[in-house]
Image (tube, coloured by chain):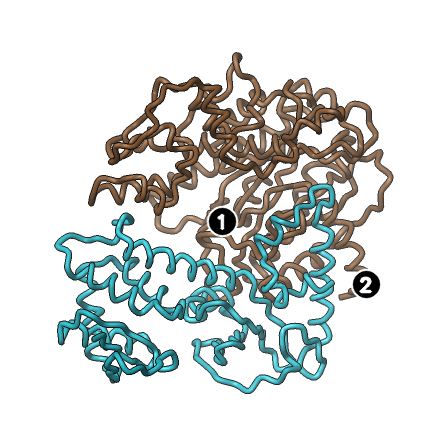
Chain colours: A cyan, B brown
Amino acid sequence: MKTILIYDGSFDGLLSAIFYVFEFKLTNVCIKKREHSQQNFFDAEEEIITDKIKATRVWKGLSKKLSARGRRKIYKAFLSEIPTIETAILNFIKRTFSSEVPIENDYSDPSILEIEKVAKKVDREKHRMDAFVRFRLTNDGIYFATIEPDFNVLPLNTAHFKKRYADQKWLIYDLKRKYGIYYNLQNVAMVELEISSEVNNTSKALTYFTVDEINFQELWGIYFKNSNIPSRKNMRLHIKHIPKRYWKYLPEKKF
Amino acid sequence: MDFNRINEKLSILADAAKYDVSCSSSGSKRQNKNNGLGNSSGMGICHSYTEDGRCVSLLKILLTNHCIFDCAYCVTRRSNDIKRAAFKVQEVVDLTINFYRRNYIEGLFLSSGIFKNSDYTMERLIAVAKKLREEENFNGYIHLKSIPGASDELMREAGLYADRLSINIEIPTEKGLKLLAPEKNKKDFIKPMEKVKNEIIQYKNEKKLLKKVPLYAPAGQSTQMIVGASGESDAEIMYTSAFFYKSFNLKRVYYSGYVPISYDNRLPSIGTAVPLLRENRLYQTDWLLRFYGFDVRELLNTEYPNLESDIDPKLSWALRNLDQFPIDINKADMRMLLRVPGLGVKSVHKIIGARRYRKLNWENLKSIGAALNRAKYFITCDSRIFEGKDRTAAQLKGLIMNSSESKFRKELSTQLNLFDNQSLLPK
């Protein structure tokens, strides 16, 4: 019989579940988010209570076996929200603890390569958000952007935007996951808002945005159009770099 | 801001700047200071891509397209009948800041036609950079063009505000330069480049002794050459390139397939295809020089003055040096691993990391991401199955080309040869 551990979806929750696996030496086990769990007759379900202390113990234990980069890879893989990622992370951690020597570069081991690959995907999406966020200046002087990334990457973007736009208020909102990060000139905080459909990606509603805002979007569109060399046109490459699902963020793709 | 006027200027001056292919915004180390605007440390970001597939990371414009020179290959040459425009310093500053705040760009790439004289033009470029840094507390990326013939004092000042300086030599050979841009001479390009190189060396030396030295062009220098405008061979281009890398510590040399823009009979006529494939092969060669430890003489020499167009230069080299293969993937040193066709720098690092734990077999190599369709003929690994047959270079080439599809297959098909397309034919 397989044991299914159900956790609340937080990273600490996942680490608590992993603690539980080691505590009771479970072997045939699978970890799932509450929202993904489906009861069945054959497996036993166990509800995990998120415990910050246990989570920290797992994390500290990992720091003895893994570099900071290796630990960050686990966190990135977690942010992918792929339904089976918890089990992959569990395998990776088991492998890490069971080995005498550090194993994070052992790319011939499938459980290591798997985490490496997912973390890379998440990294790529994070980098795309660094690139494709388009701020629009609202009437209250906040630079505002909406995004719908494939993975939950906003926590990874925070540091970059904070460092770069230190002298302007900004808000980046993830429409898919219904939360955003807001910088108030001192620090960045997580916020949840009701977002009117009028401020979605393409909106130019003057009730929210300044007149200059619309002018600058147009200027940017003109710049984009004129920096293209038509005799080198290569749409395949273009779409490879900016997949169509991102076009809706980009004012330059609207002109 | 008068947006209608700016719209028009921007469309003229962005259009004129687009033949400069450099767009990199990486390699600098400018941090955001005093809660100002922007930073440019570490890797660059491409914020968008044009329909030709090129990255847009900087606001790349000319300050003006008025020019006193008449270089045949250039759109803004004096004798060309086009609309002319000029930005005011403040206009460029406002555009840069407003684009930057919206996360459209990583910074500014400012070039210019040469008006009045070199120093006057260079001064105006510096004025923009200075204003951005000092009045706007802007720490984003700034790439300035060094104007040929600009004085040493101005080059010194430019480097204090810019992250990168570049000067395009455009024509790789001196005889080509005489033909296409008789008013310019090589000395005018070399002098500012030399000055910037020396300043960077001096900065690095001072940095070792003193804690606070003002940054000087932290992202270094680069240059660009036009490919296919003056009948030069691949060897001539790459030897020039290697010379510049070595003598001026350049960060990058860019190769720009010539886009026909004039009916001048010294140049390929309008309608001639841009030599994209050739450009691609030159970039591959450039990478082999910078990251794979190749010497230019191994790849191009009097016997082989041009690159093969149907296979990449590394494969081409390997086929000429079959006596050095096959190598054992579990034992070979990094230098040799990098020379295996189908293994890139990242795969090589993964192989070296992974083989500490166990001997690697074909399965491992495949999951690591090696392109085995090419690599398998040049390596052995922990498996009894390997390509044991002795094949000639021509046989191997045929096998590999049959098993892969080049993205340039259209250009490579024999049909194209029906047309008189000089740029693709072997010279």
Give SS at disc 1. Answer: loop
Task: Give residue B170's quadrant in the image.
Answer: top right
Foreground pick, B244 / A115: A115
What chain does badge 2 belong to?
B
User: In the image, residue B267 lies at what x, y percent?
Assistant: 76, 26
For residue A144, the mark is none
Outermost residue on the top side: it is B303
User: In the image, is residue B158 above or below residue A166?
Assistant: above
Relative depth, front residue between A245 and B297: A245
The three-letter amino acid code for the residue at tag 1 is: Ser
Say above or below: A3 vs B322.
below
Q: Is residue B140 visible?
A: yes
Instruction: Report crowding for label 1: few under 14, some 14 to 19, many 20 or more residues within 10 A (C-alpha).
Output: some
Residue B220 vs A247, above or below: the answer is: above
Secondary structure under the numbered disc 2 in the rendered image: helix
Q: Which residue is mark 1?
A: B26
Left or right for A200, reference B399: right
Question: What residue is pinned by disc 2?
Answer: B4
Label 2: how many residues lie within 10 Å, few (<14), some (14-19) or many (20+)? few
Q: Amino acid at mark 2?
A: Asn
Can residue B246 be spotted in the picture? no
Q: Position of residue B49 (x, y in %)?
A: 62, 53
Asked whether, in this view, residue B301 is left or right of residue B359, the answer is right
Whole-percent x, y for residue B32 in the image: 47, 61
Residue lying at 55% horizontally and 54% vertically, measured from the top left: B46
- Farthest front residue? A41
Marks 2 and 1 sit apart, C-alpha to C-alpha, by: 33 Å
First reached walking from the N terminus: tag 2 or tag 1 = 2
